[in-house]
Image: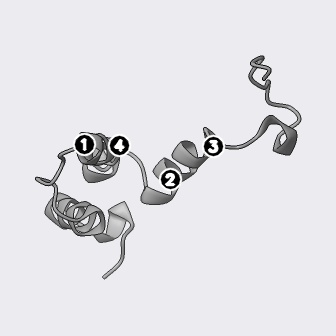
């Protein structure tokens, strides 16, 4: 089984996300629901998993690693 939108049904994508994140009901600290929401565009067939993960990871890249991207002005 593939993971691309073109290779899966919506139900299969829901199962892929649920299995990847573990028990969706175990959100005692509130983070699991946020992760599930993050992948809703994949489930709905709007974005591939790769694109969602790249967008998420891009928020954590240091400004030094991306010279064309403005960095945070916060100084310790």
Residue that protrudes farthest toward the front in the picture: 76
Quick one: label 2 or label 3, which is nearer the N terminus?
2
Q: CA distance from mark 4 to mark 2?
A: 9 Å
Query: Dot 4, how many residues are within 10 Å of its Cα: few (below 14), some (14-19), or many (20+)?
Result: some
In this picture, residue 45 sits left or right of residue 68: left
Q: What kind of element bears circle 3? A: helix
Residue 58 lies in what quarter of the image?
top right
Residue that protrudes farthest toward the bottom in the picture: 1
Quick one: label 1 or label 2, which is nearer the N terminus?
1
- State if disc 3 and disc 2 touch (CB < 8 Å): no
Q: What kind of element bears circle 2? A: helix
Q: Residue visible at 79% across and 30% down? A: 69
Residue 65, x across and y down, in percent: 83, 45
Q: Residue visible at 36% across and 70% down? A: 3
Q: CA distance from mark 1 to mark 2?
A: 22 Å
The disc placed on residue 29 is 1
Query: Dot 1, how many residues are within 10 Å of its Cα: few (below 14), some (14-19), or many (20+)?
Result: few
Q: Name the residue that disc number 3 marks.
A: 58
Quick one: label 4 or label 1, which is nearer the N terminus?
1
In this picture, residue 48 sits left or right of residue 43: right
The disc placed on residue 6 is none
The disc placed on residue 38 is 4
Quick one: label 1 or label 3, which is nearer the N terminus?
1
Q: Quadrant of the N terminus?
A: bottom left
In the image, residue 28 above or below residue 48: above
Residue 45, x across and y down, in percent: 31, 50
């Amino acid at each position: 089984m593939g993971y691309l939108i073109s290779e899966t049904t919506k139900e299969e994508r829901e199962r892929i996300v649920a299995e990847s994140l573990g028990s969706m009901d175990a959100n005692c600290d509130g983070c699991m629901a946020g992760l599930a929401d993050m992948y809703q565009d994949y489930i709905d067939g709007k974005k591939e998993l790769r694109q969602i993960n790249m967008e998420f990871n891009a928020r954590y890249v240091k400004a030094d690693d991306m010279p064309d991207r403005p960095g945070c002005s916060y100084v310790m």
